[in-house]
Image (cartoon, rainbow, N blue to C red):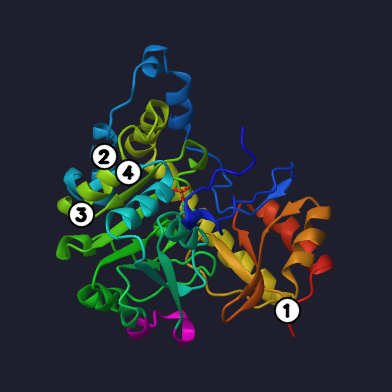
Amino acid sequence: MNGTLLAARAAYRDVALYETDESPCEVDVSDNTNLWGAPPSVLRAIRDTSAAGITRYPSAYTTALKASLARYASVDPSMVVTGCGSDDLLDSAIRAFSEPGDSVAFCAPTFSMIPTFAHLNALRVAPVHYAVGWGLDREKLLETRARIIYICSPNNPTGTTVSREDVEYVIARAPGLVILDEAYAEFARDRRVDLTRSSERVLVTRTMSKAFGLAGLRIGYAVGAPALVREVEKSRGPYKVSALAERAAIAALEEDLGWVRAHAAEAIASRERFADALRAIGFAPLPSEANFVLVPVPAARDAVRRLRTRGIAVRGFEQLPGIGDALRITAGPQPLMDRVIEAMRAEVSPCV
Ligand SMILES: *Cc1c(COP(=O)(O)O)cnc(C)c1O
């Protein structure tokens, strides 16, 4: 053995592993998952799976799941690609439509995985500020000439949305691929999957991790023109969705859309009540169309630690552009939110 460390790919030098706190916590409102649980049909589908359902390889590109998703999104199955979470689609799409050294542009702050996927694919990032009122700064985005423009609406971590008109403006003028991340579509007033019918350069990514309550099964999908989707599928590779996950996802889509819609409505109502309660004790949460709210606070790290001592896990952010420190808190059943409000009142002071 020689003593020098085998050199990994240069682009990985500054990539850190994703950090999570896995210690148990009574009230976990940190990750925007469905705090009401998973659809009953999913649990049935998993329980009823026999050995024959797992000893063989699954469908290479999930033909059956694509058909169910296409019905749900009102598009043709040839416009759908699935993956191991929508993270997998974001990574695959960035790789499929760029060369090393190109860049990914986005309005910051946005989904924290985007810089990671950019770096893993040897791309640079080109962050720009939002326009006032959390609108897209569409000219600044286009001026980057980036091969990939990423737009997240409702945006993680702010919860804010951008206008359909601004998204269409960017799609019409972008030099390369526009990714529209709709991970929170079910909680928003407007959905934009229809934009994929009129443009060959927009890919809408979605997930079953949030409204559908299936984060642990890792199922995401993307919608776009058939030729676009085929390239993402090549980049993704075969067998990325397990047989169990595919069966469970189909059950949810075919049998439990009522359950999903009812709980999305509950999440929206809970989010609004929670934002009102925060305002009543002096906080100023951002306007959200997702299943969470972002609350500016003076010192996020300290606030996260103090809430944790009361059995509450929230996601803290430091020095977000245009915001400063903030806490992102998932909307869930009322008893949980009551505990969060009580702890916020006792442990965290609002920004002055
Ligand atoms: C949660 C989230 C995702 C990733 O979801 P998975 O399908 O679980 O990988 C993608 N984009 C945004 C904005 C998210 O918040």
The residue that label 4 is drawn on is 236
Q: State how many labels appear.
A: 4
Residue 154 visible in the current orientation: yes
Q: Which residues are magenta?
A: 131-140
- Residue furthest to the top in view is 51
Quick one: SS at disc 3? Answer: helix
> Which kind of residue does numbered mark 4 sit on?
Arg
The residue that label 2 is drawn on is 66
Identify which residue is drawn at 37% across, 43% down: 257
The residue that label 3 is drawn on is 228
Q: Nearer the viewer, mark 4 or mark 1?
A: 4
Q: Earlier in the sequence, mark 3 or mark 1?
A: 3
Residue 120 x %, y %: 45, 54
Identify which residue is drawn at 51% across, 54% down: 12
Quadrant in the picture for the N terminus: top right
The residue that label 1 is drawn on is 282
Quick one: SS at disc 4? Answer: helix
